[in-house]
Image (cartoon, rainbow, N blue to C red):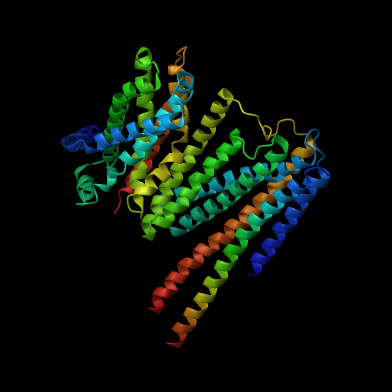
């Protein structure tokens, strides 16, 4: 319990620094003004989600080749946390789009990719919920997770190409395009803080899975 | 090579099983027909709009049909536990997957070819002049759908609600196939037909990636 | 300040999502921990 409190406080401190960077250090954007500051939460959340899904992929591979359950715990924890970060992207996106463009949603390439990512990993969790036997659940979801992650670059490329042939207003600006150095630094600071948050959340969720395993063992003893 | 001979034997079995009853093929074709007709109520099928929306609607219909058609793939092996027999019969478990995905690709392709003339008539789209290239698009797209679909059919075979789960797992994964096939088909059905090679190459890449993934990881799905 | 409410809403919702998830995992951790303690006591008393 002590470790989680200390870890949580450390993450909060990092996030406070990041918030300061985003709101006070980074200069105001020329055309959009204040609303652009949502970018510092929106874009790095997307990048962090991808990192979490990469960790999930590693967990999936680990399980398939070793069949040790702690890889499965890593897989489900990072998939859930990745989904949380995806949700933040999908919530902050429309809030940014609406005042600037008057629409709540634009089928801009990054937002579309995030929506598909969200669906892919929600399906991962649903597959797990619907597969009852623990060994089969771990194996089926591990193989599905591998397929899903291999699909991600293909999804990204196809959406990008499709968007260049059917252009839409690029609502959220190309990543890093026209970013002043101070803005870029603020974005990286925010990303570092979010990566720390991601690590903390995955660690928490992993402990929950581990605890579930020991609870099952103790329950079996008690019977 | 034993993989090839095992696959051909199993492929023969899959084809014979289906052509004995033809129920999978008939239900798939009727389903796509229904979807195409229903779409025409939602979109006014005058020439200009058909040409814009037609390819997308066609591939959506194919995807929905495929996600239903792929369900019996591994489920029918559960009834009499024929999967264990199959596993004992072959040296490389990949032969089982290869046979099933070839059969699925074939059935899907057959359904698509039977439906294309009807689609051409209903939506007023010229397909005859681009038929060879269209066949290539259908082949590469169907291969992608079948490869992912066969894998996911095995993955969801032991889950609850598997009839609903397979489409749920399959459709997001097939996003690249939907986009690429639609774009390639749209290029061919435009007033100035053009073969969009980059999309065909992309479909080929998708097929290779998923085939390789199935080869590497498929055998784990067949474990007891 | 134009759009202050939007910026505020975006960050508030974002943190709410993170915090909500954190709390949900924490609650489940605590209740599982309690159950394990209870079961262990049961085993000891046997």
Picture residue at 41% right of the left edge, 41% below the top: B170
Q: Count numbered badges in the picture.
A: 0
Report the front residue among A147 and B138. Answer: B138
Q: Is residue B52 above or below residue A127?
A: above
Give coordinates of residue C1: x percent, y percent: 83, 44
Give coordinates of residue C46: x percent, y percent: 42, 87
Side (left or right) of A182 relative to B47: right
Q: Give the quadrant of residue B118.
A: top left
Side (left or right) of A206 relative to B123: right
Picture residue at 41% right of the left edge, 79% below the top: A222
Give coordinates of residue B143: x percent, y percent: 35, 30
Q: Give the quadrant of residue B189.
A: top left
Q: Is residue C27 above or below residue B121?
A: below
Report the front residue among B108 and B49. Answer: B49
Q: Is residue A82 above or below residue C44?
A: above
The answer to whether residue B196 of the structure is visible from this angle is no
Report the front residue among A103 and A115. Answer: A103
Give coordinates of residue A113: x percent, y percent: 56, 38
Q: Quadrant of the N terminus of chain A?
A: bottom right
Q: Quadrant of the C terminus of chain A?
A: bottom left
Q: Is residue B55 above or below residue B16?
A: above
Q: Give the quadrant of residue B107.
A: top left
Side (left or right) of A203 relative to A186: left
Picture residue at 44% right of the left edge, 59% below the top: A69
The answer to whether residue C25 of the structure is visible from this angle is yes
Picture residue at 28% right of the left edge, 30% below the top: B106
């Amino acid at each position: 319990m002590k470790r989680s409190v200390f870890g949580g406080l450390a993450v909060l401190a990092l996030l406070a620094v990041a918030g300061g960077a985003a709101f006070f250090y980074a200069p105001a954007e020329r055309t959009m003004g204040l609303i652009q500051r949502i970018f510092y939460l929106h874009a790095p959340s997307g990048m962090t989600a991808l990192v979490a899904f990469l960790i999930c992929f590693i967990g999936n591979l680990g399980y398939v080749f070793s069949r040790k359950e702690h890889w499965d715990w890593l897989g489900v924890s990072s998939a859930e946390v990745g989904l949380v970060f995806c949700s933040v992207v999908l919530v902050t996106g429309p809030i940014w789009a609406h005042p600037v463009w008057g629409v709540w949603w634009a089928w801009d390439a990054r937002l579309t990719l995030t929506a598909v990512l969200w669906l892919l990993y929600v399906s991962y969790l649903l597959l797990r919920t619907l597969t009852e036997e623990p060994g089969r659940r771990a194996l089926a979801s591990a193989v599905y997770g591998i397929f899903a992650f291999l699909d991600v670059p293909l999804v990204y490329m196809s959406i990008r190409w499709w968007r260049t042939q059917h252009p839409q207003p690029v609502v959220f600006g190309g990543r890093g395009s026209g970013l002043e150095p101070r803005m870029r630094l603020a974005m990286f600071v925010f990303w570092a803080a979010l990566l720390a948050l991601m690590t903390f959340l995955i660690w928490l969720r992993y402990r929950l899975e581990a605890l579930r395993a020991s609870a099952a063992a103790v329950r079996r003893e008690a019977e | 090579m034993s993989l090839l001979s095992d696959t051909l034997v199993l492929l023969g079995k899959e084809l014979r099983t289906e052509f004995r009853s033809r129920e999978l093929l008939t239900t798939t074709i009727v389903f796509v027909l229904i979807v195409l007709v229903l779409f025409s109520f939602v979109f006014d099928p005058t020439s200009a709009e058909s040409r814009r929306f037609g390819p997308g609607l066609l591939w959506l219909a194919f995807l929905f049909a495929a996600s239903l058609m792929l369900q019996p793939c591994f489920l029918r092996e559960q009834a009499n536990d024929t999967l264990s027999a199959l596993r004992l019969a072959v040296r490389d478990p990949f032969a089982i997957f290869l046979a099933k995905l070839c059969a699925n690709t074939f059935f899907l392709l057959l359904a698509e070819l039977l439906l294309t003339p009807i689609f051409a008539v209903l939506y007023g789209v010229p397909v005859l002049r681009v038929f060879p290239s269209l066949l290539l698009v259908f082949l590469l797209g169907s291969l992608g759908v079948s490869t992912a679909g066969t894998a996911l059919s095995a993955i969801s075979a032991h889950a609850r609600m598997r009839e609903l789960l397979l489409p749920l797992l399959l459709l997001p994964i097939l996003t690249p196939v939907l986009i690429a096939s639609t774009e390639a088909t749209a290029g061919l059905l435009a007033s100035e037909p053009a073969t969009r090679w980059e999309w065909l190459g992309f479909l080929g890449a998708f097929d290779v990636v998923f085939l390789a993934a199935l080869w590497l990881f498929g055998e784990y799905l067949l474990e007891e | 300040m134009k759009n202050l409410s939007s910026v505020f809403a975006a960050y508030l919702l974002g943190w709410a999502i993170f915090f909500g998830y954190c709390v949900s995992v924490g609650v489940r951790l605590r209740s599982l921990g309690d159950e394990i303690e209870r079961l262990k006591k049961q085993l000891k008393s046997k």
